[in-house]
Image (cartoon, rainbow, N blue to C red):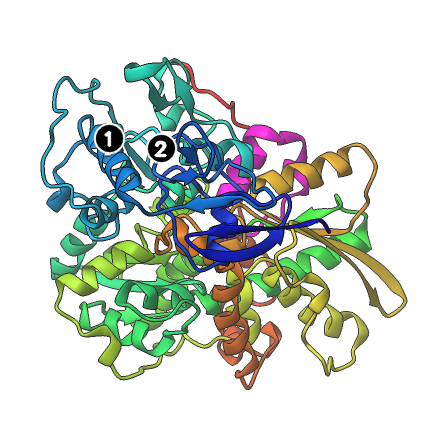
Amino acid sequence: MNMVTLTIDGVKVTVPADYTILEAAREAHINIPTLCYLKDVNEIGACRLCLVDIKGARALQAACVSPVGEGMEVTTNNEKLRKARKINLELLLSNHNRECTSCVRSGNCELQALCKEYGVENYPFDGNKSEAQIDEISPSIVRDNTKCISCRRCVAACNKVQKIGAIGVAKRGFNTTIGCIYGMSLADSPCINCGQCILACPVGALKEKDSTADVYAALADPEKIVVVQPAPAVRATLGEEFGMEIGTAVTGKLVASLRRLGFDKVFDTDFAADLTIMEEGTELLGRLNNGGVLPMITSCSPGWIKYCESFYPEFIPNLSSCKSPHEMLGAVIKSYYAEKAGIDPKNIYVVSVMPCTAKKFEAGRDELSNNGMQDVDAVLTVRELATMIKNAGIDFKRLPDEDFDSVLGESTGAGVIFGATGGVMEAALRTVYEVVTGNTLENVEFACVRGTDGIKEAEIDLNGKKVRVAVAHGTGNAKELLDMVKNGEKEYEFIEIMGCPGGCVTGGGTPIVDATTLSYIDLKTERAKALYSEDAGKAKRKSHENEEVKTLYKEFLGEPNSHKAHELLHTHYIARPKYIKK
């Protein structure tokens, strides 16, 4: 590897020759401010906040796109640079909705933080503002262009990472806008509701559709029995909203906080993850043994499902018919639990706490209902739940650890790892291996499907039968994998696909981490560690060992893939157009 040595603010640093000045500065522990920059996603030098002074250069240069050179002398902090950055911030604010106190990103806004850092107190460039555009039609995402700073990070996340192309750039200069083609709503575009654009946005131009008012109303209704269920990834991410280190598992405090918010029952989506494995594993074995459609592809990620329906409808027959875990649990709560507790299902209100904005879209699908009732009534993101906890004055970090309610609260380690890419595959393999071979799996950790590679492959020996599996996370990687299958380049029996890069731990509803921090850590890996650690600490690590799941089958469902199980726990999917014309 070719290396070069340069000097940045008097510090000599030796870095690979293909580095930019921004990357080299961070190697020297020097932070240059950025707004449009998002590592490996958006490196376009548009915001001009990362300007640096290079000795011998005729003008200031954008560090994020300027390559390093041997012997280069760079200054990142002088009066000229500070003045230039402040002016650029003032120019951005001249066309920005500055109602910061009512903004969902107040206190966690990269623009706000930089304005404070550079002492921006006045607005010398006030004048005409771009026409306001607020799109609230989508069930998952709100787009508010009055706050947009045209950094293009959301566009890069949607186009380069997810390869969806739902949003782009229109017009030029002062009239530049970020939005959908022909000015249509996100709801009518190819948007899969994944929310990766929200995570990429440095300001409040994108946010989830707020469901807290609906949940508060249900909690206040004396006729309602309000049941809540948090997804596996929630326990690995919620603590960040309260200043805890990335990758801290907060399972017990999560349960305690939900009880203090007034929920009548706190069940665990991890229980339903174990249930999903029983249904999905049985379905896979049925397809393998009876000539069913292969490869079978997992169906627990609603962003992926919508992507498949719109972009790859030819793979709909390959999808597992299983509902996603929280939808399964919603159906079980309004049938099995309602019957055991003597409650009219119509009086039960099910709230799912998810790391995912696409779950809001999923909850409203007609295919996910029973007896005229939706399986899940409301979906909160991790961020929305954190807001409710803060509003209630709950001291989250000091809460005692509490356990989930019984009947639908037990889980195994297999259920926990659903939140990480490869987790569904690993959980399924733990159970399928023992069912097929009749042998006890001593080492339950399938390292071959772990990690953050975009596409992972493995071959599993099931008593002499070779099963080829693959894992993809993020729809950009899914596209690559599906194209290889379509073209006959690859053959598999079982595929796991998650709509978000990294899986649920970096879903569109998780805590937002600023771009500078993302340059130093692998968020996907750090959050997944919390789930794998909890899995390792569980006494039971295989879904078929879950005693409450066994009881559910014994008392109510009969057996996996039974007629009753299909009525409650399985569904179907439909081809959808990419664009909805109105």
The spot of residue 527 in percent (x, y) is: 47, 65
Span highlighted in magenta in the image? 302-324
Q: Report the number of numbered marks.
A: 2
Residue at the front extreme, as displayed = 56
Callouts 1 and 2 close, C-beta under 8 Å: yes
Viewer can see residue 327 = no
- Residue placed at 14% from the left, 42% from the top? 100
Task: Say whether residue 146 is magenta.
Answer: no
Label 1: few (<14), some (14–19) or many (≥20) C-alpha neighbours in 10 Å: some
Residue 437 lies left or right of residue 119; in this view the side is right
Where 492 sits versus 132, above or below? below
The spot of residue 157 in percent (x, y) is: 48, 37
Inspect the image, locate mark 1, and give the three-letter code of the amino acid beneath it: Leu
Inspect the image, locate mark 2, and give the three-letter code of the amino acid beneath it: Cys
Q: Which element carries disc 1, helix, strand or loop?
A: helix
Say which residue label 2 marks: 47
Task: Say whether residue 308 is magenta.
Answer: yes
Q: Which element carries disc 2, helix, strand or loop?
A: loop
The spot of residue 79 in percent (x, y) is: 26, 42
Res 92 label: 1
Residue at the right extreme, as displayed = 464
- Residue placed at 41% from the left, 21% from the top? 169
- Tell me the quarter of the image containing the C terminus: top left
